[in-house]
Image: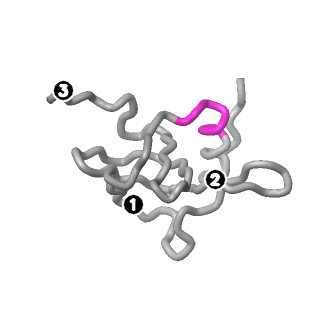
């Protein structure tokens, strides 16, 4: 069996989609064979003004590291630069220049 190394690494901003259809942007803190650990996961949602980000879990502190079981994930990819910059702004308050 061929084992491929993921195209993302620790500290990258990634997007993953769950089997339930939720699209989530987060920061990777650990990569394991069957799971990844993420911090500050934000789910994408539609708003009056377009796509917005809300906490993935409303009852857990945003800084809590969450273990995501890869068996429940449809895909994982590095987040597009523009969206990653918006994510950083919404989770840190830092303004990032968009190219």
Image position of 8 with respect to 69: above or below: above
* Callout 1 crowding tier (Cα within 10 Å): few <14, some 14–19, many ≥20: some
Residue at image position (61%, 30%) is: 81
Query: Percent x, y for residue 39?
Result: 45, 55
Mark on residue 44?
2
Give the Cα distance between marks 1 and 3: 30 Å
User: Nearest the camera: 73 or 30?
Assistant: 73
Mark nearest the camera among 2 and 1 is 2
* Callout 2 crowding tier (Cα within 10 Å): few <14, some 14–19, many ≥20: some
For residue 80: magenta? yes
Span shown in magenta: 79-85
CB atoms of marks 1 and 3 within 8 Å: no
Element at label 2: strand
Mark nearest the camera among 1 and 3 is 3
Give the Cα distance between marks 2 and 1: 19 Å
Give the Cα distance between marks 3 and 2: 33 Å
The residue that disc 3 covers is 2
Give left or right: position of 88 versus 95: left
Q: Decide which of tag 2 and tag 1 comes sooner along the chain.
A: 2
Mark on residue 65?
1
User: Nearest the camera: 82 or 51?
Assistant: 51
User: Nearest the camera: 68 or 84?
Assistant: 68
Q: Decide which of tag 1 and tag 3 comes sooner along the chain.
A: 3
Quadrant, the N terminus: top left
Residue 47 sits in quarter: bottom right
Mark nearest the camera among 3 and 2 is 3
CB atoms of marks 2 and 1 within 8 Å: no
């Amino acid at each position: 069996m061929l084992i491929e190394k993921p195209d993302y690494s620790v500290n990258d901003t990634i997007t993953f989609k769950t089997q339930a259809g939720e699209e989530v942007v987060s920061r990777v803190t650990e990569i394991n064979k069957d799971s990844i650990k993420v911090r500050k996961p934000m789910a994408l949602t539609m708003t009056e003004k377009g796509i917005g980000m809300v906490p993935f879990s409303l009852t857990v502190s945003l800084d809590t590291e969450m273990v995501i079981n890869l068996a429940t994930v449809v895909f994982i990819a590095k987040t597009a630069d523009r969206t990653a910059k918006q994510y950083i702004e919404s989770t840190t308050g830092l303004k990032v220049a968009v190219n």
